[in-house]
Amino acid sequence: MTDPVSNTPREIRETFREFFGAHARVFRAPGRVNLIGEHTDYNDGFVLPAAIDRCVWAAVSPRRDSRLIVRSTNFPGAVEIDLEETNPRAAHHWGDYIYGVAVMLTRAGHRLRGANLLIRGDVPIGAGLSSSAAVEVATALALLENSGLTLDCVELAKLCRRAENEFVGARVGIMDQFISCLAQGGHALCLDCRSLEHRWLQLPRDVSLVICNTMVTHQLAGNEYNTRRTECEEGVRLLSRSLPDIRALRDVSPEQLQHHAPELPPTILKRCRHVVLENARVCDAAVALERGDLAGFGCLMRESHQSLRDDYEVSCAELDLMVALAEEQEGVYGTRMTGGGFGGCTISLVKSNAVVTFQRAVSAAYLAKTGLKPQIWVSSAAAGAGEAG
Ligand code: GLA
């Protein structure tokens, strides 16, 4: 990384002083990669993400009035938010993530003080690494602490998700906010998105998480995401005629889906098949990781990608190419697209001693085939959000 994490809180405090002339406290929240369990969270299913070493920082100092003055080193201009506004509305602007968090905290009964805020992030935007959840979580922590308040991590994650669902208008699941709040260094987190039961699974030391950014983001991603959700809901509606006890695709077993497949139109069947089998894969992957069976884990990653490509149809040519190039390399256990899809990043589990060759070979081959220079980096599995030193 060109931007050493250890220097960042000091730098951000200096920038804050230039903007606001005050001393700031700094909070950080990480982005994430999802190792397996894609598009399962909003189907009440299972996911297995890890936090990454790229994060968002929120620096904060109190104000005497009831306004939030927000600046970002990533975007020009300032955003002004009145905490007493009785009819808060999204402006389709980066400030919505901050405004949404302030609104949801207030609606949940937390009395916020006015604040100056500076947001800075190094999670690539639109790359499927969950920069928006990191902004939400860092902001929520900063606003709470600035008001002398604290909140349990699970409640914090739920509230940030609500900001994105109800204020920003993206119907995302709980995965991104949850891992940003609850991650533990060196571990992935296996989460049941219905009960929110979770356990941390240690990642082997001699294996690296290698993230490859295809450098493409597809404009349609937001609409397509909501369409997939609707298709899953339609699957539940149709299946519940024969299976009256199901509430979500999480409740459907692979055998049940196979049995009732003729009751579903072809596209809905494909979407359901991805979700139902992906849930099973996450459970198998967690067991494989606990047993140290990385080859088994890697096979499940590969199957997950194929299913996202063929059944859920959220991959794209660049992601498929990156996966194919990664799979050709020595020391790779498995690779798949990570996040919502339609561009963004892949995640590979790679033997640590094979990483340098991997980076060089994949980068050169991807550039030769696409004309795009990918960003490829190794991330540690980082700790969850908190105050930065
Ligand atoms: C986005 C959403 C998550 C999840 C993934 C797909 O990252 O924010 O809630 O649905 O897509 O797994």
Image (cartoon, rainbow, N blue to C red):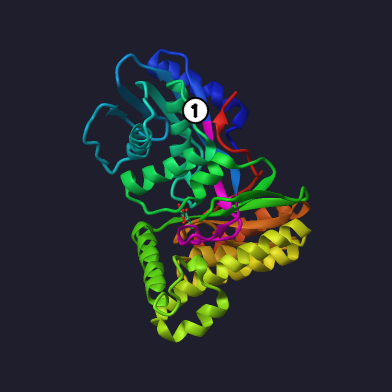
Magenta residue check for 177: no
Q: Residue at x 78, y 52 (%)?
A: 353
- Residue ID at (39%, 65%): 228
Q: Nearer the viewer, residue 19 or 269?
A: 269
Asked whether 355 or 371 is in front, the reply is 355
Question: In which quadrant will I find the C terminus?
Answer: top right
Query: In the image, is 305 to the left or to the right of 208?
Result: left
| Residue drawn at 63 percent across, 59 percent down | 362
Q: Quadrant of residue 325?
A: bottom right
Residue 330 x %, y %: 74, 63
Q: Is residue 129 among the parts visible in the rendering?
A: no
* Highlighted range, magenta: 28-49
* Ligand 1 under 8 Å from disc 1 Cβ: no
Question: Which residue corresponds to the image point at 37% horizontal and 63% vertical from the top-left?
Answer: 224
Q: Going by the image, does 182 lie left or right of 139?
A: right
Q: Position of residue 299 (x, y in %)?
A: 68, 68
Q: Around disc 1, counting alpha carbons within 10 Å, would you say few (fewer than 14), some (14 to 19), or many (20 or more)? A: some
Residue 108 is at least partly visible in this image: yes
Q: Quadrant of the N terminus?
A: top right
Question: For the residue labelled by badge 1, is the local secondary structure a helix, a strand or a loop?
Answer: loop
Could you tell me residue 114's position as x and y percent? Answer: 34, 21
Instruction: Confirm whether the magenta stretch covers residue 30.
Output: yes
Query: Of all residues shown, which one is farthest toward the left?
Result: 87
> Is residue 225 shown above or below 246?
above
What residue occupies the far bottom of the structure in this picture? 262
Residue to which mark 1 is pinned: 150
Q: Nearer the viewer, residue 260 or 245?
A: 245
- In the rendered image, residue 149, in percent from the top left (x then y), is placed at 46, 24
Disc 1 marks which amino acid?
Answer: Thr
Residue 290, placed above or below residue 205: below
